Amino acid sequence: MIKALLTGHSRGLGASVAETLLARDIPVLALARSPNAELAARFPRLLREVSLDLSDTAALAAWLAAGTLARFVADADHSLLINNAGLLQPVGPVGTQDALAIARAVGVNVAAPLMLTNAFVAATAGCADRRVLHVSSGAARKAYAGWNVYCATKAALDHHARAAALEEVAGLRIASVAPGVVDTDMQAEVRASPLDAFPSRRRFEALKSEGALASPADTGRRLVDYLLSDSYGDVAEADLRDLPAPGRAAH
């Protein structure tokens, strides 16, 4: 049996990843601030939702200590963790940002994925096949003015995956995967940024107007296909746009 833990399933790419997993009869334990009523109605047997603000590291630590994650994966032959939740804000040059906004971004984008990964690996020690996917970004690998916090936090996920892969933990496959530019609410947020805060805004406006944004549904399916493929974890850092269509391995 495959079981999956997913963050940020209430909308956008996370909702598409959740739908793809659930449609394949994979039980999902989903963490987000808000529920996904549509998916809950369609998949009442398979979807378990936890309302949690991932920027609250103390609350996340308390939830992990309660053992819900460990109980969920206890009977799984194949276990998945998809660290999808992320924040774009604060956007703007260094020196103009709110301190609490920086802390919140670091909590959601870095602390939560690392805490969840650590707990997941500990809880699945007896599982022969456990896989962790950090949803990264092109901003982890190319710097953008105004995105110094977002770039830094996504780059942290890339480096975490590289280091964890070197540790060669038994049965663990881990990768940080950039999904490409996807037509989500975050992209609308990007296009709404003031030019003085984000000078590259017009490039993202052009991607939208030219129809060059990937759909969340297609990207979610491709991410899940890759996560379940034989080749997953062969590299610790990947860009979904550069990968061939994989064959599925876990079943």
Image (spheres, helix red, strand yellow):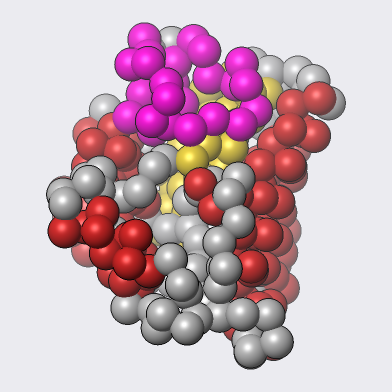
Looking at the image, residue 101 lies above or below residue 133: below
Image quadrant containing the C terminus: top left
Describe residue 14's horizontal placement relative to residue 94 as left or right.
left
Q: Is residue 39 magenta?
A: no
218 or 64: nearer the viewer: 218
Image spot of residue 10 (x, y percent): 33, 61
Q: Is the residue 201 above or below the residue 234 in the image?
A: below
Residue under the image location 64 percent in, 68 percent down: 149
Find residue 24 and report its horizontal and vertical position in percent: 27, 28
Q: What is the residue that sits farthest to the right in this orientation?
A: 167
Say which residue appears at 70% left-offset and 51% top-offset: 156
- Which quadrant of the figure contains the N terminus? top left
Say whether residue 6 is left or right of residue 40: right
Q: Residue at x 38, y 69 (%)?
A: 201
Q: Residue 78 at x, y = what percent?
A: 52, 22
Q: From this viewpoint, is residue 116 visible?
A: no
Does 232 appear in magenta? yes
Task: Give the magenta part as a residue range.
Answer: 222-247
Q: Looking at the image, which is closer to me, 64 or 66?
A: 64
